[in-house]
Amino acid sequence: ILLSAMTFSRTITVGTSADFPPFEYIENGQFVGFDMDLMREIAKIAGFDLKFVDMSFDSLIPALRAGQVDVVAAAMTITDERKQVVDFSIPYWTADQSVIVKSESPLTITVLFSKGKIGVQTGTTGDLWCTDNLVSTGMLPEKNLKRYDTFVLALSDLLNGNIDAIVLDSPVANRFAATKPVRVVGIITTGEQYGVAVRKGEKELLEKINNAIKVLNESGKMSELIDKYF
Ligand code: GLN
């Protein structure tokens, strides 16, 4: 019986962008973080095997649509634009955007948003917020918004003084503020929600994921995962 169950179990390839602690990062060569454990728990309940693949955040949706990955678990915000091209699970997290600067930086939000050099990760909601609210409105010159493939690169530019601030998801900003010489100087209340993404029309897979999220919420396992990483 066990053998036949194993024969039929499907391997799900999960795309992530492992530079986003505590949601996804690499430690001792392993994918760790809240989203990674969440996917492992979902897989246990749904009965599939998992394989993680790391890539830049803006490659995730194209890779999903092209069939290179089956699921995206990357602290990905459910947005109307993304919903046109992928399907999302029920939400499992709520976040805002935060602005971080070097600990000793005297720059205020007003100064930063009018003449600072701001870093974002390409294609993230932080990028979209800055593009729509700062650049498109003419408040911040286009050249002052610097887009990065990963937060690792953005952080090193911040610490080296090449940029003045980074706009990113609040839980990750808080983690960086606790582990690096940076501090949160402002919060933009977006109330965005994270979901796990699948290819459009993958109804069965999505249902299994949603069902597993509900089971984890009800069993207390979700709170256990939160306690582990936050
Ligand atoms: N939640 C943000 C978004 O979906 C950032 C995600 C990330 O950088 N991994 O765009």
Image (cartoon, rainbow, N blue to C red):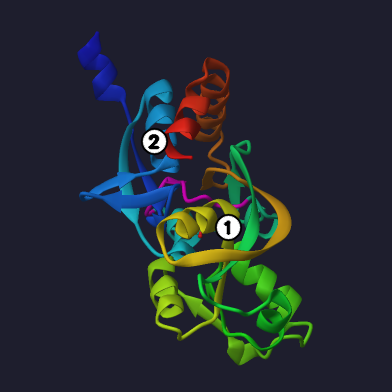
Task: Kindly tell me whether mark 1's CB lies below 8 Å from ligand 1.
Answer: yes
Count of marks, rendered view: 2
Where is residue 146 shown, x and y percent of the image?
53, 82
**Is 99 in the magenta?**
no
- Determine contact: label 2, label 1, CB under 8 Å: no
Tell me the quarter of the picture where residue 141 sits: bottom right
Dividing the picture into quadrants, the one containing residue 44 is: top left
Q: Is residue 157 above or below residue 70?
A: below
Mark 2 C-beta to ligand 1 under 8 Å: no
Amino acid type, label 2: Asp
Q: Quadrant of the N terminus?
A: top left
Q: Which residue is mark 1?
A: 169
| Residue at point 54%, 81% (across, down) | 164
Q: Amino acid at mark 1?
A: Asp
- The overriding secondary structure of the stretch rendered in magenta is loop
Where residue 131 appears, as percent x and y from the top left, is 67, 77
- Give the residue at mark 2: 37
Q: Is residue 211 visible?
A: yes
Numbered badge on residue 197 = none
How far from the left and from the top, in percent, is residue 7?
Answer: 24, 23
Residue 200 or 184: which is nearer the viewer?
A: 184
Name the N-terminal-most of marks 2 and 1: 2
Residue 149 seen by the camera: no
| Mark 2 vs mark 1, CA separation in Å | 19 Å
Where disc 2 sits, the SS reads helix
Q: Secondary structure at mark 1?
A: strand
In the rendered structure, which segment of residues is drawn in magenta? 68-77
Q: Is residue 137 above or below residue 89?
A: below
Identity of the residue drawn at 42% across and 45% down: 70
Q: Which quadrant of the figure shows ligand 1?
A: bottom right
Q: Nearer the viewer, residue 138 or 189?
A: 189
Which residue corresponds to the image point at 45% horizontal and 84% vertical from the top-left?
Answer: 161
